[in-house]
Image (spheres, rainbow, N blue to C red):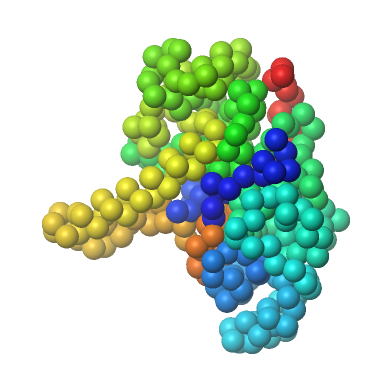
Amino acid sequence: MDPGQDAADLHPAAGAGPVPGPRIPAREPDVTSLPVVVDAMGGDHGPAEIVRGAVAARREHGVPVVLVGRTGVVQEELARCGAAGEIDVAHAADVVPMTERGAGAVRMVCSSLAVGFDLVRDGAAAAFVSAGSTGAVVACAVDRLGTAPAVLRPALAVALPTTAGGATVLVDAGATVDPTPEMIAQFALLGASYAQLVLGVADPRVGLLSIGAEPGKGNRLTRRAETLLRGMPLRFHGNVEGGDVLTGAVDVVVTDGFTGNIVLKNVEGTVRATVALAAAQGVAGSAELGLVARRYAPETHGGAALLGLTRTVVVAHGSSRAATIARACVVARDLAEGEVVARLGDRLAIRPGR
């Protein structure tokens, strides 16, 4: 995933996603039979790794999937996996490049993104998974699916394991890199509701990421957002610093997508570097270090949930390999079957003033 890119061209996305074992609400029987659409052409390693991941999702996790992309290419990859005829393929003639930020992707009406989102919009699929450019995915999702009522902009939610044993939702992790203060206030509502529905936190504490914990710290965007958050119907803890993200000091850390994506990738990189240093010094065995590394690995978390839409969308790392895609499909299925998107829309009753 490359959430650093934005949908700003249209409206002026480690892994990420729910930690293992989310408390998904009761499922609706009629949703369980619908497949998850997987963008076979997205990502740095598509279509080979994407197809392998989709096959693994079906075989190992029982997730029904539909691959969308250039039929001939996708069928060849399925054959290499020994899965010819096992998974349906929806043809899409065009591929959105990883360098596309947003508006250009919307104009490509025959792309794997457009065709895949149309399947979800028309009720032929339960959710959509892509490792493509986050800016392009967000822009196409808004264009083809639309945002939920009152939502200003979508946001990516990532559940990061904490030293306290639980998880903290980081939102926005890269969907909207230039938000207004009102958007950040709404991201907080989305993140708090997500923490309630997916992580089972009854009354989530929300912290605003800033350069200091004292009130009034930060740039103009942060200071204005802080003022709005103090009047929002949520449990606002106040400002938090970068060092608080993994401590469990709050249940939700809210920030703009530019900062959030930097935080996310810094966490992933720091974990990898720390594990490597510990291994080199013989501080702990490889098995123990591997357990720590896997808590933050993309193949564990799969992808980030794109909140604020009318349907379920999960954005995976652009560098995703098969295991990550398989996990993203599981996350997408669980979110769709738990009706998390619909329940988020029900809870978002307040639209911050402009």
Q: How many marks?
A: 0
Residue 38 visible here: no
Q: Is residue 34 above or below residue 260?
A: below
Q: Is residue 124 above or below residue 77?
A: above
Instruction: Pinpoint residue 26: horizontal percent, then vertical percent.
Output: 68, 45
Image-based side of 164 in relation to 337, left or right: left
Instruction: Pinpoint residue 276: horizontal percent, then vertical percent.
Output: 24, 58
Choose between 34 and 141: the one closer to the eye.
141
Q: Is residue 160 above or below residue 212?
A: below
Quadrant of the frame with the C terminus: top right
Q: Is residue 153 above or below residue 271?
A: above
Residue at point 72% right, 38% down? 11
Residue at point 72% right, 71% down? 69
Image-based side of 173 in relation to 311, left or right: left
Residue 220 visible here: yes
- Image quadrant in which you'd find residue 279: bottom left
Choose between 78 and 105: the one closer to the eye.
105
Image-based side of 183 in relation to 103, left or right: left
- Image quadrant in which you'd find residue 126: bottom right
Instruction: Pinpoint residue 115: horizontal percent, then vertical percent.
Output: 79, 63
Quadrant of the frame with the N terminus: bottom right
